[in-house]
Image (cartoon, rainbow, N blue to C red):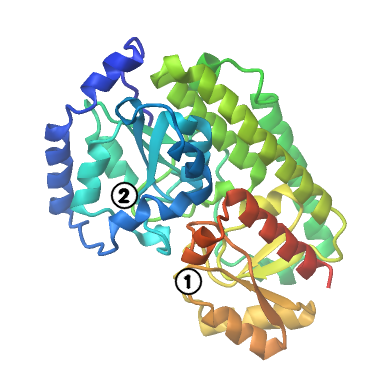
């Protein structure tokens, strides 16, 4: 659900009302205390700067006075990069989930809730990724807080907890063909619905998003839905356009700048998509084993098959039977690489790799930046290219 401030206000007039949120902050904080969601101990202060080193660098040199900038909170790192790339120096964008913290199970503290209610905008992924978001959306009713769900209206797929169980029923050639057919049909439907993405007016886009409500369960789990849409560059482009349309509708005086910034960033995402498509088109194999079922959209887009050790939650521990099936699959298919990720323990991936004599490598779901990522000024685009290189190598061995 997206709620906007009256778009008839000028930006300067709107800014004068942004501070009138203390009552809303107290209300939302009270809700949090009652619901018991204040048990997160991670430092929020660490979440504001180190999560987004690359996009925020330009903002530091901004000529826009601080008092005139929008105050935007975003849930976790990809939402930061997408939003900051759209707003440029017109907004201060801050990440809620601290660096190095796995966002699936993160809950905002009472202070986080107060800070959110004092912001102008909250951007979150949705599709069940942020279990706490619906509480804020509901609590924001009647307030000035704008909430933007980046996945709103997108085709959300069901998360398959144990995709490898189907590997024994069909040949890899049949699966690859089925994936390719599904992918082609999926892209055709999306293209027919959205066209090129560059020719629609902001009003048409905003209206389209409002008309495409999905019936996701936004409670404190994924509800069987896969929220990892940002890992498919094509879906990332759609999320950028959704955020842009919502911000443009709320702040029409900045719409031209938002659109120009979005176009520039989407050009980079389109190049990323082209590189994924070219790099993965003719690989020797099409299936890959990963620690966490985060790559369903990416696999669907590029004709691959994800074989997850665990399910949609990276903290999920596979049973002994599930581990045995993964090992059996890996041996039967001569898998040489077991992928793990950066923000959770790699122990399960290490165990399987040792059992079959394979190596391990990182396939990053980009749910947050590590301190090392931030120190190297890595961002979504560079991390996705690292993922592409890792897949190309593993799928050609």
Residue 205 location in percent, x, y?
A: 54, 21
Residue at which label 2 appears:
132
- Disc 2: CA contacts within 10 A as few (<14), some (14-19) or many (>=20): many
Residue at which label 1 appears:
344
Mark 2 and mark 1 lie on one chain; the one further toward the N terminus is 2
Q: Is residue 370 above or below residue 382?
A: below
Quarter holding residue 24? top left
Residue lying furthest top: 8
Residue 131 location in percent, x, y?
A: 35, 51
Q: Is residue 168 left or right of residue 70?
A: right
Q: Are marks 2 and 1 in contact (CB under 8 Å)?
A: no
Which residue is found at the position 38% from the left and 32% from the top? 1
Which residue is found at the position 52% from the left and 32% from the top? 86
Q: Is residue 92 above or below residue 258?
A: below
**How far apart in space, not on screen, are marks 2 and 1 (Cα)?**
21 Å
Q: Is residue 270 left or right of residue 223?
A: right
Residue 358 location in percent, x, y?
A: 72, 83
Which residue is found at the position 75% from the left and 83% from the top? 331
Residue 119 location in percent, x, y?
A: 28, 35
Residue 327: assigned label: none
- Could you tell me which quadrant the C terminus lies in? bottom right
């Amino acid at each position: 659900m997206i709620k906007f401030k009256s778009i008839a206000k000028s930006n300067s007039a709107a800014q004068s009302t942004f501070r009138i949120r203390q009552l809303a902050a107290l209300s939302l904080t009270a809700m949090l205390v009652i619901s018991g969601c204040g048990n997160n101990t991670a430092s929020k202060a660490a979440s504001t700067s180190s999560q987004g080193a690359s996009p925020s660098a330009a903002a530091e040199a901004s000529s826009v006075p601080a008092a005139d900038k929008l105050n935007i909170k975003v849930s976790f790192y990809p939402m930061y990069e997408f939003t900051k790339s759209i707003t440029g120096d017109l907004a201060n964008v801050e990440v809620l989930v601290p660096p190095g913290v796995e966002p699936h199970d993160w809950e905002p503290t009472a202070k986080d809730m107060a800070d959110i209610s004092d912001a102008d905008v909250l951007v979150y992924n949705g599709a069940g990724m942020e279990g706490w978001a619906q509480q804020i959306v509901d609590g924001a009713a009647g307030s000035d807080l704008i909430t933007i769900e980046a996945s709103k209206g997108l085709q959300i797929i069901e998360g398959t907890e144990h995709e490898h169980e189907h590997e024994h029923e069909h040949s890899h050639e049949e699966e690859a063909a089925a994936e390719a057919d599904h992918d082609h049909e999926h892209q055709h439907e999306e293209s027919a619905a959205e066209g090129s993405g560059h020719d629609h007016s902001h009003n048409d886009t905003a209206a389209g998003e409002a008309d495409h409500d999905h019936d996701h369960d936004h409670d404190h789990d994924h509800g069987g839905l896969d929220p990892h849409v940002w890992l498919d560059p094509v879906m990332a482009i759609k999320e950028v356009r959704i955020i842009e349309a919502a911000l443009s509708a709320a702040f029409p005086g900045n719409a031209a700048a938002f659109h120009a910034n979005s176009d520039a960033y989407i050009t980079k995402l389109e190049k990323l998509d082209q590189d994924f498509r070219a790099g993965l088109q003719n690989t020797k194999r099409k299936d890959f084993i990963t620690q966490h079922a985060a790559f369903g959209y990416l696999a669907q887009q590029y004709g691959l098959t994800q074989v997850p050790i665990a399910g949609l939650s990276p903290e999920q521990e596979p049973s002994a039977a599930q581990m045995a099936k993964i090992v059996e699959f890996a041996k039967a298919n001569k898998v040489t690489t077991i992928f793990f990720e950066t923000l959770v323990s790699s122990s399960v991936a290490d165990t399987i790799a040792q059992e079959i004599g394979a190596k391990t490598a990182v396939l990053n779901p980009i749910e947050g930046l590590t301190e090392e990522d931030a120190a190297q000024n890595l961002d979504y685009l560079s991390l996705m290219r690292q993922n592409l290189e890792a897949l190309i190598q593993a799928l050609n061995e």
